[in-house]
Image (cartoon, rainbow, N blue to C red):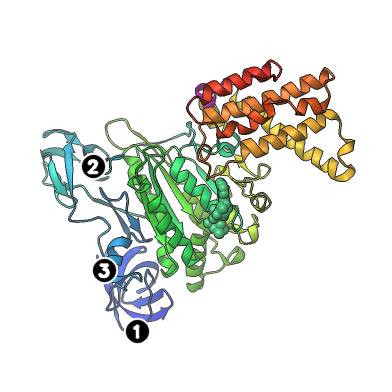
């Protein structure tokens, strides 16, 4: 049912209208003569409080508000990949073409191009019975991604008509016996999780290409990670690296920026990135949802839902999707601003009391699922959200609430960033709750001693920490020779294993196999040092062993031939560290 009301109050992006008795929470409305898009967020008697997605300057009391009768919907279909949207899925390029750099008010353009025609290849025949999630056919959306056109949730029947050919997204590609026409495009309310057949436990890793993550704090495909870090600690570089190198077929990047230029960077940098695995534009498997600073808070608040709905849609096709959010703190700030306008009772640091449950609701939309549809398909949405705690203080509400739901905590440390140790991951504060779930995969796929090596590495780093305290108190001379070796090897590991430059051609990304062999080599070297010490070889000669330099150069070795070179080095270390 739709209803029409009258504006009785305007306060920034929040508008109150009366005579809205038929409206429902989250319904879309058009506000005022300019038809500004908005959403109902509170109802009292016949009064609706509305958050408007655009600048409300100039709105007058008495102007009309029209309830469209449906909630905020995402439009899903071929053409999403490569698109750049604002938080309510307005296509920025199409709108910019109409209005220039500043988006004019009330301007609308369909999220998915209506004119473009796609070559549709049917996957079912007339007479076949189909239900939600069944693949009707495919469209080559980009050279990399085949778009599976699925029966939308809620539809079911027997195919009366289906044919190959070129279609625009609104034309029906199939007709059911009851007359239902199914076009390529479908719509879904963004605040509601898309259905799946069942949720599966995490068992496979989400390979990031960053050793410190994959080896020490692995993320599961379908899991959620947060990257809390103060100003300039490298959150955005991590997210961009994941977009380029992580084990995902489709990337949905949600940019919530505060500083104007932050999002301008995303808008200029992202489209320029190439996909390292194909050499083609990364945008061919990416959807960008961005909020620039001149967009109102309500659109920013909606953006994470628009993003995750698109992610779920590709998951439903059976793809591995990464939802990267930078940063979720800006989203939480939007929530806080809206809440304060509603004069709700504030919780900690002014955030609404439902902050934690909203955040949990968002992270929990990630997951590994068995997709709807007759054919067995598995899809994942892995969520990685950057968190920008003010002053880098992790005890603030957004970090704390996120931490409660996300299984991985990749804490960035300003001290490391300052010393240009990147990724600036603090290995004392970081953790992964997925280790038990994904280690079987690493042990079976990479090496049986994967878990042991990680433990040995962690023990080495902890030992270094303790020894450094001793050194600070009483000086290096108080250490025994074996302890000095620990300090040297752990420094080598930090500098040449954990550290990984995003700008190095050979080392920007690293396979688990390469990471494993590097770690094996470093730890074998440590064992060799201990062995030589026990045989009374002087520390100085041990540290002068030529393999040391080789270890330090290992990360820069090219992928081709790496395995042989690394195995050769490990063997030589095992035989006493002599020259080739
Ligand atoms: N992995 C990396 N390799 C090399 N340099 C890096 C890496 N990560 C970060 N840097 C350096 O640190 C700078 C700041 O990183 P980045 O912009 O990602 O920080 P941020 O945490 O997103 O900052 P902000 O709080 O402003 O959003 C980069 O411009 C780059 O010079
Ligand atoms: Mg950043």
Residue annotated with mark 2: 149
Kindly give the residue lying farthest to the bottom in the view shown: 61
Residue annotated with mark 3: 98
Kindly give the residue lying farthest to the front in the view shown: 580
Quadrant in which the C terminus is drawn = top right
Q: Which of the marked residues, 1 or 3, is nearer the chain's N terminus?
A: 1
Name the secondary structure under disc 3.
Answer: helix
Residue 396 on the magenta segment: no
Visible residue check, residue 254: yes
Q: Is residue 7 above or below residue 420?
A: below
Residue 161 shown left or right of residue 482 in the figure: left
Bounds of the magenta segment: 442-447
Horizontal and vertical percent for residue 190?
36, 55
In the image, what residue occupies the spot 39% across and 45% down?
274
Image disc number at residue 61: 1
Q: Which of the marked residues, 1 or 2, is nearer the chain's N terminus?
A: 1
Measure the C-alpha gap from mark 1 to mark 2: 45 Å
Measure the C-alpha gap from mark 1 to mark 3: 29 Å
Residue 456 shown left or right of residue 164 in the figure: right
Q: Which of the marked residues, 2 or 3, is nearer the chain's N terminus?
A: 3
Horizontal and vertical percent for residue 428?
68, 43
Q: Main secondary structure of the magenta part?
A: helix
């Amino acid at each position: 049912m739709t209803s029409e009301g009258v504006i009785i109050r305007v306060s920034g992006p929040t508008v109150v209208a009366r005579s809205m008795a038929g409206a429902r929470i989250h319904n879309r409305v058009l506000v005022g003569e300019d038809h500004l898009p908005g959403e109902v967020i509170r109802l009292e008697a016949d009064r609706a409080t509305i958050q408007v997605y655009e600048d409300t300057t100039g709105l007058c009391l008495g102007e009309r508000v029209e309830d469209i009768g449906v909630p905020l919907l995402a439009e899903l279909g071929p053409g999403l990949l490569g698109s750049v949207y604002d938080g309510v899925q307005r296509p920025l390029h199409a709108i910019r073409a109409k209005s220039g750099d500043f988006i004019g008010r009330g301007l609308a353009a369909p999220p998915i191009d209506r004119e473009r025609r796609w070559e549709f290849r049917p996957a079912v025949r007339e007479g076949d019975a189909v239900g939600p999630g069944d693949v009707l056919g495919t469209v080559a959306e980009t050279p990399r991604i085949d778009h599976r056109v699925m029966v939308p949730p809620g539809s079911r029947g027997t195919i009366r008509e289906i044919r190959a050919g070129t279609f625009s997204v609104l034309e029906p590609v199939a007709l059911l016996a009851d007359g239902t026409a199914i076009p390529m495009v479908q719509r879904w309310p963004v605040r509601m999780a898309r259905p799946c057949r069942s949720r599966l436990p995490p068992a496979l890793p989400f390979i990031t290409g960053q050793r410190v993550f994959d080896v020490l704090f692995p993320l599961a495909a379908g899991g959620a990670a947060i990257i809390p870090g103060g100003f300039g600690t490298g959150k955005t570089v991590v997210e961009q690296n994941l977009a380029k190198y992580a084990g995902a077929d489709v990337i949905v990047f949600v940019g919530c920026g505060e500083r104007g230029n932050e999002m301008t960077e995303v808008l200029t940098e992202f489209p320029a990135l190439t996909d390292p695995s194909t050499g083609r534009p990364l945008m061919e498997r990416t959807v960008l949802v961005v909020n620039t600073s001149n967009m109102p808070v309500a659109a920013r608040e909606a953006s994470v839902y628009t993003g995750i709905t698109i992610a779920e849609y590709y998951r439903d096709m059976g793809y591995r999707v990464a939802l990267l959010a930078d940063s979720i703190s800006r989203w939480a700030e939007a929530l806080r601003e809206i809440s304060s306008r509603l004069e709700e009772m504030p919780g900690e640091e002014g955030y609404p009391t439902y902050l934690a449950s909203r955040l949990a609701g968002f992270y929990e939309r990630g997951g590994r699922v068995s997709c709807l549809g007759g054919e067995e398909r598995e899809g994942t949405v892995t969520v990685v959200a950057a968190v920008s705690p003010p002053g880098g203080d992790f005890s603030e509400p957004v970090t704390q609430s996120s931490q409660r739901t996300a299984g991985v905590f990749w804490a960035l440390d300003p001290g490391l960033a300052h010393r240009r140790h990147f990724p600036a991951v603090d290995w004392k504060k970081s953790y992964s709750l997925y280790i038990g779930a994904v280690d079987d995969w690493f042990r079976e796929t990479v090496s049986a001693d994967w878990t042991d090596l990680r433990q040995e590495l962690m023990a080495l780093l902890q030992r270094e920490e303790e020894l450094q305290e001793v050194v600070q108190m009483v000086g290096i001379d108080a250490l025994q020779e074996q302890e000095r070796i620990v300090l040297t090897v752990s420094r080598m590991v930090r500098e040449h294993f954990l550290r990984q430059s995003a700008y190095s051609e050979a080392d920007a990304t690293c396979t688990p196999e390469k990471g494993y062999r590097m770690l094996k080599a470093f730890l074998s070297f440590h064992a060799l040092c201990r062995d030589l010490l026990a045989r009374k070889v002087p520390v100085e000669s041990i540290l002068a062993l030529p393999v040391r330099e080789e270890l330090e150069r290992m990360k820069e070795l090219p992928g081709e031939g790496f395995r042989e070179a690394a195995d050769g080095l490990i063997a030589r270390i095992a035989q006493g560290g002599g020259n080739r």
